[in-house]
Amino acid sequence: MEEDSRRPQEAEQGPRKVARQLSENLASRIALPAPRPKGELSLEEAISRRRSRRQFKDSPLTLEQVSQILWAAQGITNGEGRRAAPSAGALYALDLYVAVGGQGAGGLAEGVYHYDPRSHVLERTLEGDVRPTLARLAMQTFIAEAPLALVITAEYERISQRYGDRAPRYVHMEAGHAAQNVYLQAEALGLGTVVAGSFQDEQVAQALGLPAGHRPLYIMPIGYPASS
C-alpha cells in the first residue's frame, strides 16, 4: 500500500472539499497546540505497553494531549502534505471526529468536532454530548465513561475513483494504520484507548451529523486508564 506522490493536489481535493463544507456552518474553530515531535517514551516501550483499555478515570484531558493524538492519527508530517498514517495513492480517505463530554478535554465545550489536519484545528460541527448515544449504539458503556471518543470515518469515493473494487480494502488498511498510531500515542501520553467497531453504522453517522457518504469505522474512547 504505497503512497503515490504523482498527484498531490488531486489527493487533497476530497479532504479540502469536506473541510470547506464543514467550515460553512462552524460554531467555532479551535487552534490546537503544536504537536511535539519527540516524547519521553520510546516507540519500543509504547509497543510493549499497548493494551486495549476499557476503564477510565473521571479526569479531563488537556488540549495538548488531544492535539498530539489527532496529529498521530492524521496530522501533517512534512511540507508536501503527507500524513502520519499511510494512505493508498496518498488520497486520504479518512476524517476524524471527536465527541467531547462535559469538561472532557482542555475546556472544550460539549459537542462533536471535526479535525482539519491541514490547519491543525478543531471545528465544532454539533453541540451536545453524544457519547451516551454512541455507547448505546455500540452497546459499550465505556464509550460514555471516557472524557472523549475519537471516531474514525471514511469517504470511500476518494479511493474508489482510482482503485475500484479494491478501494474498501485500502480504506480499511488506512483506518487500521491510524488506529494503531492512536493506540501507541495514547500509551506514550499515559492514556488508554480501545477500538469499537461493532455498532449501528447509519445511526452513528446520524448521531454525529456526518456529511453524506461518510461512514464511521472505529469509535475509540480515550482517557486516563482506571487500572494498569
Image (cartoon, rainbow, N blue to C red):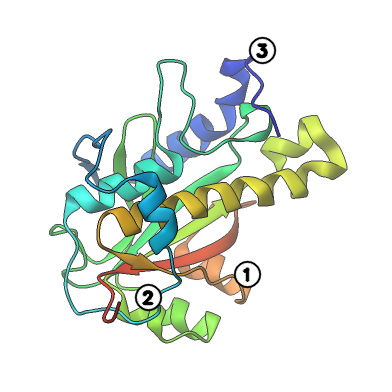
Furthest toward the right, the residue is: 165
The residue at which mark 2 appears reads as 131
| Disc nearer the start of the sequence (3/2) | 3
> Label 2 neighbourhood size at 10 Å, few (<14), some (14-19), many (20+)?
many
Q: Of callouts 3 and 1, which one flags the residue occurring earlier in the amino acid sequence?
A: 3
Disc 3 target residue: 6
Do the CB atoms of the residues marked 1 and 2 lie less than 8 Å apart?
no
Position of residue 52 relative to residue 45, above or below, is: below
**As drawn, 202 above or below 5:** below
Task: Identify residue type, mark 3.
Answer: Arg
Q: Which mark is residue 178?
A: none
Pointer 3 with pointer 1, Cβ within 8 A:
no
Badge 2 amino acid: Arg
Q: Residues within 10 Å of mark 3 (few under 14, many from 20)?
A: few
Q: Position of residue 6 (x, y in %)?
A: 66, 12
Q: Is residue 125 visible?
A: no
Residue kind at label 1, given as amino acid type:
Glu
